[in-house]
Amino acid sequence: MPKLADFKTNEKSWWCPGCGDFGVLAALQKALVDLGIEPHKVAIVAGIGCSGKIGNYINCYNFHVVHGRTLPTAMGLKLVNRDLTVIAAGGDGDGYAIGGNHFLHAIRRNVDVTYIVMDNQIYGLTKGQTSPTSKLGFKTKSSPEGNIERPIRPLQLAIAAGATFVAAGFSSDVKQLSQLIAQAIQHKGFALVNVYSPCVTFNKVNTYDWYKEVLINLDEDPSYDPSNRGAAIQKLIETDELVRGLVYKADQPSFEELYPGYRDEPIVHQDWTLPEEDFAQLLEQYR
Amino acid sequence: MRERRLASWKIGGEQGQGIDSTGELLAIVCNRLGYYIYGYRHFSSRIKGGHSNYKIMIGTEPVASTSSELDVLVAIDQETIDRNHKELVEGGIIVADAHFEPVLPEGCPAKLLLVPLTQIAQEVGNPLMRNVVSLGVSAHILGLPLDAFKDVVMERFGKKSPEVGQQNVTALEKGYEYARQHLPEPTWRLAPGDGKKRLIMMGNDAVALGALAAGCRFCAAYPITPASEIMETLMTLLPRYGGVVVQAEDEIAAITACIGAGFAGARAITATSGPGISLMQEAIGLAHVAEIPVVIVDTQRGGPSTGMPTKHEQSDVWALLYGTHGDTPRIILAPSTVEETFYMTAEAFNLADKYQCPVVVATDLSLALNKQTVEHLDIKRIKIDRGALLTDEEIAAQAEPDGFRRYRVTESGISPRPLPGQPKGQYLATGVEHNEFGKVSEDPRNRVAMMDKRLRKVPSDPAAMGLEGVTYTGPESPDLLLVGFGSTVGPISDARKMLEAEGFRVGHAHVKVLAPLPVRQLVELFARAKQVIVVENNAQGQLFALLEHRVGKAMREQGLAVPAMHSVRKYDGNPFLPKEIAAQAKEVTSYAQAG
């Protein structure tokens, strides 16, 4: 069985001390250990931004791609090797701004990929500009008079688009977050884990203390039913998405289950030889 | 009766009137009778309305281009006559539906034959069958056996129901019978075909078949003219062999999905045209730096921007050569025929695996969509070569405490790669400059070592990659050397014959690999020629500039005299006619004055 140490690398971290992403990394490593998945069976596709560096700090197959394109890359990866645990990871800018279109279509398609978004409501690596999840009035270098663009509500957006697994985590509660990530990995289909992961350097509003005070833990609410789509949306509206825990889960067939002729044996392991008689038969269509 | 070895036929009408499928039927019939075919579709970017036509060259010998001359025009409406009558030869025939009361334009040397196509179709049961009636008429005019038509019509329409099939056969027979009884006796007929079994397909078919044969089992693409058929064909083919095709949300998703599949070890393809190439450029750079195989097909069309989406052009040469930012070694294959498209697409996957980088197959609208006769496609010639992969044992033996040296700096520049799922092979693939382990590094020495490694892995001469970079036809020392790439092969080859018939000594070099450019071979060809004429379908002379820069420079460096270089370009949306090339060749060279 894999140990936590198996998922560590000797890479020195480039993240600021206290960065929320440390908690996400620890939770992800713990989830993989808890599920007993070996490092070589995991592939992480990471985006651009501070969060995108996560692949440097976890021992598994890693692919650090261009800005905003983690989801289609992860889809291609997963569809040709279904034996792998495929995780896409990035920030709120990567996922909801430049990659926003892919987010919607990854949800529609429902390929078995886990998507972890480290949401700090700011652009960190470019040193402090407004992000698509920044609240109204939020002052940054790119919104000196305060943000006038309404923030994206990723959880509501995901549910509205037809997501079959939506969770919200908080990077300082590694235990809960690792459980959410583990559930997301086990979910058959696209799974979103949006993590409030504070930026200690550029976001002085949405801090650890602030989140601790405002976040409502749905997992501790026995009356909350994550299988009720309407109630989930209602709760997200009431709380302005300041929640953590499993928000919504539905049982819907994945892309892989629906795709005609999709085989148990991963494409990368199949024999690709095209029999000569098959080819001869194909050519008959062109006579 | 006089027999002819080559004839041209065209049907025209409004888009949505079954023009394409009627042309297709005649092409299939002729193919089965053992004729060589070259088809050309003229269409617009809309579903209904607007003039469209389908022209077919039918020959007893290989046909490689459309000519401007037309023997038989089938007109479903007056616009077809007005727009196409100038192509008709002296004594040519217009078969026009009497229904629209056709008028022969003044001065047109053709004969206008009125046939009640719609009325006959109506009598048989459905006015829409007028196109089939016109095929019956055409069979009589061209001197082709009606039975061959019956089989094809039955296959096509009998699928719906045997009754519909039979109805169409009746429509066909009535058309033939009408022509026999009421039209003037034809003065010529096509010499019989040799009855040999051949294939008729377009470049897009050949791409799909080549990909399948090469082991490609993943495709992600976004619909775009004139590439969509590649994705559509693979959508029917790949699932039968365990593969997957995804219609992506855009071309960026398409290319990155393919890169993800390539990273995992699959053979993946995406197919697009100019606008899609523009969107893919950043990701193409990622595949270069992260060293991931992927095959990209660019079916070039009129640009820039939306340009002329349904019109032919060859204007992506510069975009493909210089598109993505940063320094990367390019591999761009440019097949010129459907047959070459099949083999070169298949080979693209071997090259991508071997050199661990994107490989572009650049076709153009003419090649992508025009149906051509193909003698045979031999799957035995397709060999799957996966390049430098590693066994689990090799990985275990090479793994180090710090990880796996995925980007090991080797003499060849090629670093053997583990695939996700292989134990102890874990590494970071990244678009960021990295060290041998894939870890981010901005160390100047490492940067230079990595850049040099990536650039040296692709040879500078296509011959070193087992590719024929340029083909040549003509005399040892031509006075004129015509140079082209892609689908201009047919028009240039026919133009060469025309010029030779006029007494010029003309050679034809066709570039099959745009990158790495076969400079050495081109220098040899240029050195033997008095004048060079570069023929291409774009406005700025993109190949001309490339050849002037690369081949001209190489010749100067070797102390060789660079021959006078001329550029012949056509960018009105239509492919070259051979006579246009011949005329322009004479005009741009001093031979115009001499001759």
Image: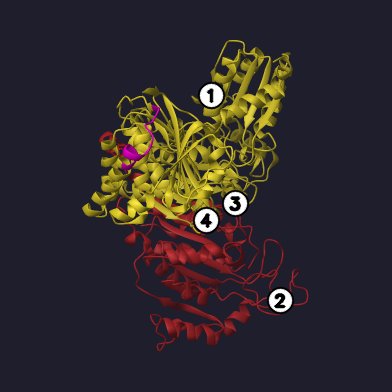
Q: Residue furthest bottom?
A: A223
x 71%, y 80%: residue? A137
What chain letter is assigned to the residue under label 1?
Answer: B
> Which residue is disc 1 drawn over?
B494
The label shown at residue A147 is: 2
Residue B556: x and y, percent? 74, 18
Q: Which chain letter matches label 3?
A: B
In front of the other: B537 or A105: B537
Q: Is residue A83 visible?
A: no
Residue B265 figure quarter: top left
Which chain did the renderer colour red? A
Instruction: Reply above or below: A287 against B240.
Output: above
Q: Is disc 1 on the same chain as disc 3?
A: yes
In the picture provided, is A247 more to the left or to the right than A134?
left
Residue B46's disc is 4
Q: Which residue is mark 3?
A: B279
SS state under label 1: helix
Q: Residues within 10 Å of mark 3 (few under 14, many from 20)?
A: some
Q: Is residue B318 magenta?
A: no
Nearest to the observer: residue B437 or residue B188? B188
Disc 1 to disc 2, C-alpha distance: 65 Å
**Where the N terminus of chain A falls, by quadrant?**
bottom left
**Label 2 vs label 4, nearer the camera:** 4
The crowd level at tag 4 (other Cα within 10 Å; few <14, some 14-19, many 20+) is: few
Range of magenta residues: B178-188
Task: Give the chain coloured yellow.
Answer: B
